[in-house]
Image (cartoon, grey):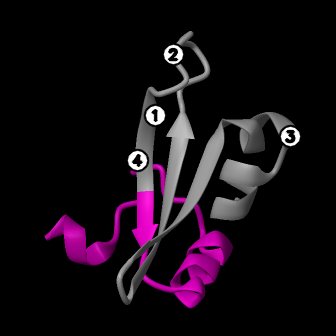
Amino acid sequence: MNNWERYFGTPEAAMRMEVSMLRDGRRFRIAVSECNPFTTCMFESRWVRDFASWGEYQDWLNAEYDDGTIKWEEDAR
């Protein structure tokens, strides 16, 4: 499962996501957050990731979703 499928693959999942394009002077940033569906407050959300370009954002969407259970050989040492 890639990040696109995990966060945007179903209408229910996509409804929880917030993607903001922010501009501060010359800098551009894309912020991705996931809203908590079990709260009545719309403002409670979990930060997922920030990106400095559309290319970074596209690469992340196509990358394999990592829920923390994948252990790389470098980390095992």
Which class describes the residues within 10 Å of circle 1: few (<14), some (14-19), or many (20+)?
some
Mark 2 vs mark 4: in front: 2
Give the magenta-colored segment's residue range: 49-77
Res. 63 visible in picture: yes
Mark 3 vs mark 2: in front: 2
**In the rendered structure, which amino acid carries the disc numbered 3?**
Pro
Residue occupied by mark 1: 45
Residue 57 rendering spot, x and y as whole percentages = 57, 77
Q: Nearer the viewer, residue 42 or 34?
A: 42
Are the residues tagged 4 and 1 within 8 Å (C-beta)?
A: yes
Residue occupied by mark 3: 11
Which class describes the residues within 10 Å of circle 2: few (<14), some (14-19), or many (20+)?
few
Res. 2 visible in picture: no
Query: Of marks 1 and 3, which one's residue comes earlier in the chain?
Result: 3
Choose top left, top right, bottom left or bottom right for residue 52: bottom left
Distance of label 1 from label 3 (alpha carbons): 18 Å
Residue occupied by mark 2: 41
In the picture, the disc for residue 47 is 4
Q: Is residue 74 magenta?
A: yes
**In the rendered structure, which amino acid carries the disc numbered 2?**
Cys
